[in-house]
Amino acid sequence: MPYNIAMVSDFFFPQPGGVESHIYQLSTKLIDRGHKVVIITHAYKGRTGVRYLTNGLKVYHVPFLVIYRESTFPTVFSFFPIFRNIILREEIEIVHGHASLSSLCHEAILHARTMGLRTVFTDHSLFGFADAGSILTNKLLKFTLSDVDHVVCVSHTSKENTVLRASLDPLMVSVIPNAVVAESFEPLPANSSNKNVQLDPLQRGRSVPRSRHFGQHDVITIVVISRLFYNKGTDLLIAAIPRILAHDPYVRFIIAGSGPKAIDLEQMLERRVLQDRVELLGPVRHEEVRDVMVRGQIYLHPSLTEAFGTVIVEAASCGLYVVCTRVGGIPEVLPPHMTTFAKPEEDDLVLATQKAISAFRANKVRTEKFHDQVKMMYSWTNVAERTERVYDGITGALSEEEFYGDTSGGGWSATRGRAGVQSFAFIDRLKRYYGCGIWAGKLFCLCAIIDYLLLQFLEMWAPRSNIDIAKNWPKKDRAGAGVQEEIGIDAARPLRHPARHKADRRYQEYST
């Protein structure tokens, strides 16, 4: 059954990153499966208004104030008028929010529930329980997820973390991992180089073929592509690089990425006089990541916390051997023969990297089959199919037994109706919010009441009948004969809401 879906997050292109790539790839695959998907995010450096991307993916860039790491200032209610307008224009049925630190995501889920829409939340991060920032984030997450229909996490470790942080029933949470477009991360062919080519990875555009054996005096290049933030292990990387280079004079580094720790990295290179052995590329676009990766043989990922780590899947797909820290969901991502794990400590990271270099010197690492193996393990089509099943479960297309399995011993709240699917009744919503804490519960109930009153005001001030229905992107018909114009609805699928027909006809008259 096709759905109209709104993906909402502060994090989207043109900013590079795993969450941004996840939203884009999932959205395009859902469109391929017959669904309508729009993305709602904030404006980026003058990119304001409506943009169309590949495959007819529509993006709404809302002009909101950005305060920290591309997150918008939390306003709670000021987003509601424009959000409601978009939802009604696009006839959205499911709102899917992404990322715990996205203000737009939390606000969209609150407003969507007030409007009577089904909601899904995908968590891409891990958080602690002791520091002040994590405590506040976890309380906000508990507020949002108290009234959401289903939660998706990208790893089993992430699921455990989210269940504990938001006090969720584990049956409400599904694990759907990230994936990779394997065709965009292909290794170099075996015949891409010859004996006359100088195999110096520091020369731009030069790469080492995957089939080459490395002697004691051949250069081995270690690639790092990451945001240069504390949680990505940049301090650990800065401490480890001089020791790794001192141990082997035929090792080079290529580092791509930007962030507040970039200045510390540059200062270390100047102080140690390592500029000739470490190449800093700065920020690179996602489509350039493969060209950087194939210049190396080892990918180093020193992250201190990670829910999944899509970049290490991309590195393995490019034929790189991965050295990474054993934190978060990283141990779930790749099989043991593709990785060497280290503790998030300087000594252990240096030791693991030296071990990987020695394995290359002894020709014990064979990466020729990595690409085909990754291609078999991860697919965005599979991610879209599993996400579509979540949508079927929360809308009732799947029965409770089909979606959740045997819930006879369940212990589900009576206010939820079907297992895990929250009731729209306002009193039930207030009961769920009230249980979030002695003081926080009352504050959350107050937010829900104000949101409800604001909706009633918007219904009078800007009636639904005055909002034009947006045209859908033209699609090929099922017979494949040309392209048909869609005015408001897709003629290839049944009309789910008969009341829309009059609005569709009115919009057709207006547009002509």
Image: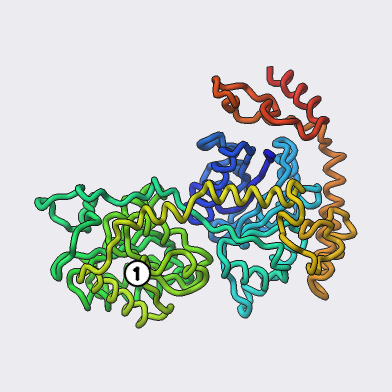
How far across and down, in percent of the image, does residue 198 sit? 13, 55
Residue ranking furthest to the bottom: 347
Is residue 174 placed above or below 161 in the rendered structure?
above
How far across and down, in percent of the image, does residue 249 sit? 18, 72
SS type, badge 1: helix
Residue at horizontal 67%, vertical 43%? 5
Which quarter of the picture shows residue 281? bottom left
Specify whether 330 is left or right of 246.
right
**Is residue 140 among what the camera can see?**
no
Residue ranking furthest to the left: 196
Quadrant position of the C terminus in the picture: top right
Is residue 476 placed above or below 42 in the rendered structure?
above
Residue at horizontal 83%, vertical 49%? 454
How far across and down, in percent of the image, does residue 427 sit? 90, 59
Q: Nearer the viewer, residue 75 or 455?
A: 455
How far across and down, in percent of the image, does residue 145 sit? 72, 62
- Three-letter code, disc 1: Leu
Disc 1 packing (10 Å; few <14; some 14–19; many ≥20) = some
Specify whether 317 is left or right of 495.
left
Quadrant position of the N terminus in the picture: top right
Which quarter of the picture shows residue 210? bottom left
Residue at horizontal 39%, vertical 67%? 301
Which quarter of the picture shows residue 336? bottom left
Residue at horizontal 80%, vertical 74%? 437
For label 1, the residue is 265
